[in-house]
Image (cartoon, helix red, strand yellow):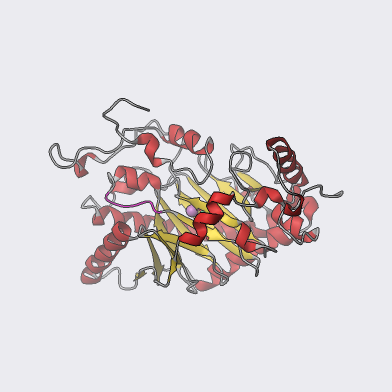
Amino acid sequence: MGTISIDTHTNGFQTAQDRLQELKAFDETKTGVKGLVEAGVESLPKIFIRPPDELLEESKTPCVQLELPVIDLSGIDEKDRYSEIVKEVLKAAEEWGFFQVVNHGVPLEILDKMIEGIRLFYEQDDYVKKQFYSRDFTKQVTFLSSFDLYTSRAANWRDTLAVQTLHADLDPQKLPPMCRDVMLVYIDHVLKLADNLLELVSVALGLRPDYLKEMECSKGWSLVNHYYPACPEPELTLGASKHTDPAFLTILLQDHIGGLQVLHKNQWVDVRPLRGAFIVNIGDMLQIISNDKLKSVHHRVTANSVGPRISTAFLLKGRLSSPRLYGPIAELLSENDKPPVYTEFTLREFASSFYSRPLDEPGLGYYKVRNNGDGK
Ligand code: OGA
Ligand code: NI
């Protein structure tokens, strides 16, 4: 692999040019953060250090001991239970933008095997893994570190294996062999759960049960499989910057380590691992089409002194080639008291604006209806 010429923070000030060089050097290793850890870094390379204003702000944002709502999906086929679940989904989606689901129908064994499959991908020989390393997002399968490496203020302490069907159906042969079978089974199960959740959300919004499915919200998706190595100086960086998801809905599975936090009433709330549960959150697109009824909420992942932590997020995004215009759903608007908050856009427009900005910059504002003519 050669020596890694990445500075650590003891050397003082870093110019933009130095930073760019270090980002490139890091990117070119093609072994991600895990590669740095294996090369023995003992202090945080500068490219990962959060800017001083953020670190200062950090000390002012309290963390509170609250629990995300947990929704038990058992008995969903019984009429009374179904209405109860719909109510719980609506409440959680309005108040938190996040909830956990248990008894969701996906066997525990498949969840465990998926996490292990992801681990196998990361823990295999660098030589094989490097062949997947790429920032070409038209590829169906890519391995990389920090999607926004060159635009963000600080790189994230995590690596990602991303699988996406935004352009075409999945070609299984493109999946890494050591986790191919388990991923295919996992995707099958999660897609079924996704359809159930889209139905619950449709009904919660007062729409026909098949409304969101017919909008093709689950037709294209990204499955992002994250690996967060143990970090030598976790207080100086993040596993994932604060962000909202560029999706309709996200279905996340995390292992037992923890680190995910949700911004609730301006306080960070830890999403403590709950074995067998999926974490579900409303994404930007669902906030837009629900005309702000449901909330796409900020979340992030702290870096941790223990690890690795593994998680896998399934983001329902739709197909980018769809000619359909997405915007606030007509049935949810009324001329007098519920005017549309957002304009309409295609999914391709949405995706390109997402990839041109750092993860921690909000994307929703871009589509806001503005009456004063001051922007897009
Ligand atoms: C994401 C995400 C959280 C996690 O992939 O969008 O928020 O726990 N992941 O890895
Ligand atoms: Ni997210």
Give the residues in magenta.
Answer: 293-297
* Residue found 39% across the figure and 68% down from its top: 68
In front: 184, or 87?
Answer: 87
In front: 298, or 166?
Answer: 298
In front: 277, or 375?
Answer: 375
Going by the image, does 348 lie left or right of 308?
left
* Residue found 55% across the figure and 72% down from its top: 109
Q: Where is residue 115 in the image (x, y as percent from the top left)?
A: 60, 65
Work out which residue is located at the far right of the displayed protein and give it: 2
Q: In which quarter of the image is the C terminus?
A: top left
Going by the image, does 24 lie left or right of 55?
right
Residue 76 image-quadrant placement: bottom left
Residue 370 within the magenta-colored segment of the rendering: no
Going by the image, does 236 lie left or right of 103?
right
Q: Position of residue 295 (x, y in %)?
A: 33, 52
In front: 281, or 173?
Answer: 281
Q: Position of residue 368 (x, y in %)?
A: 33, 36
Residue 295 within the magenta-colored segment of the rendering: yes
Q: Where is residue 191 in the image (x, y as percent from the top left)?
A: 45, 55
